[in-house]
Amino acid sequence: MIPMLKPVVETAELEKRYGDAASPIRALAGVDLTVHPGEFVAVVGPSGSGKTTLLSTLATLLTPTSGKIIVAGEDLGSLSESERTVFRRSKIGFTFQSNNLVPYLTARENVELMLRLNGTLNKQTRPLAGELLDRLGLGDRLKSYPNQLSGGQQQRVAIARALVHSPELVLADEPTASLDTERAHQVVETFASLIHEQGRAGIMVTHDLRMVRYVDRVVRMEDGQVADILSDPGAIEALAEGAPMPVSIPAPLEALAA
């Protein structure tokens, strides 16, 4: 038997609370999650279920109230703020609904920025930006500035920027929100292919259930908790085709990944 690779993401009893002790708002209410290298996971659920809070916590943009997060072997709770910044920049790639492109940099330069910030931009790595943008259908827009790109094109630049420095964990919050249907499928399929090929761990939050056909597991959240997990390929395809998500008692994630 081939030994299972060590998880890239492990959370245990993860909680994020807001408000005072008397009437706290629990954005996350005891989330246990494990994601392995080369695994692409979709997180779905209604607005307010904790999906984006979970992503922001994994990205070290939010500090959990309690619980444990280990990403790429690092206990995030043990890191100082400056260490978290360095860790986020080098080990995590993320794209949220606000793509945050630098307006005075071209598409290529926006993608190269992650390499520059990590001190890894050189003759060997410079072509990676162009290759990723070409694969995402932007090979003819390398020299375009953000204001010369459509919203969907800007989103694809942000996705390339999230992948170019080969992070161990890639996070995407609604990566297809500004894309038409055809381009959305193309982008998520390419996203999934890159995660699988490069052995990254990928987590995507999406409201568009058609996009889950490209993932390995679907995690449904409700009221800040993991409500259900779907790992059967046939069931995932049925969900993408419009079938309701089966309600079940989640099995341990380690067993689902076996």
Image (cartoon, helix red, strand yellow):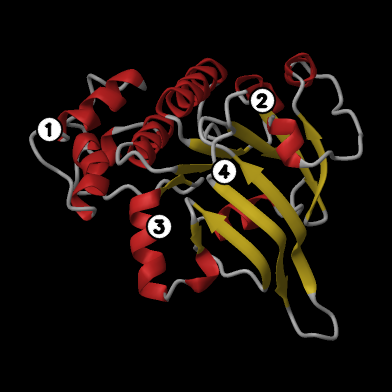
| Left or right, 108 with reference to 179 | left
Q: Looking at the image, which residue is at 49% across and 54% down? A: 73
Residue at the farthest front position: 1
Mark 2–mark 1 Cα distance, whole angstroms, equals: 34 Å
Residue designated by label 4: 7
First reached walking from the N terminus: tag 2 or tag 1: 1
Q: Measuring from the top left, give residue 92's x and y in whole percent.
A: 42, 49
Q: Measuring from the top left, give residue 62's x and y in whole percent.
A: 55, 66
| Left or right, 135 with reference to 6 | left
Give the amino acid at mark 2: Val
Mark 1–mark 4 Cα distance, whole angstroms, equals: 29 Å
Residue designated by label 2: 212
First reached walking from the N terminus: tag 1 or tag 4: 4
Residue designated by label 3: 88
Secondary structure beneath dot 2 equals helix
Residue designated by label 1: 124
Give the amino acid at mark 3: Arg
Residues at discs 2 and 3 in contact (Cβ within 8 Å): no
Relative to the observer, which residue lies in front, 52 or 82? Answer: 82
Mark 3–mark 1 Cα distance, whole angstroms, equals: 23 Å
- Of circles 2 and 3, the one toward us is 3
Q: Looking at the image, which residue is at 76% across and 35% down? A: 255
First reached walking from the N terminus: tag 2 or tag 3: 3
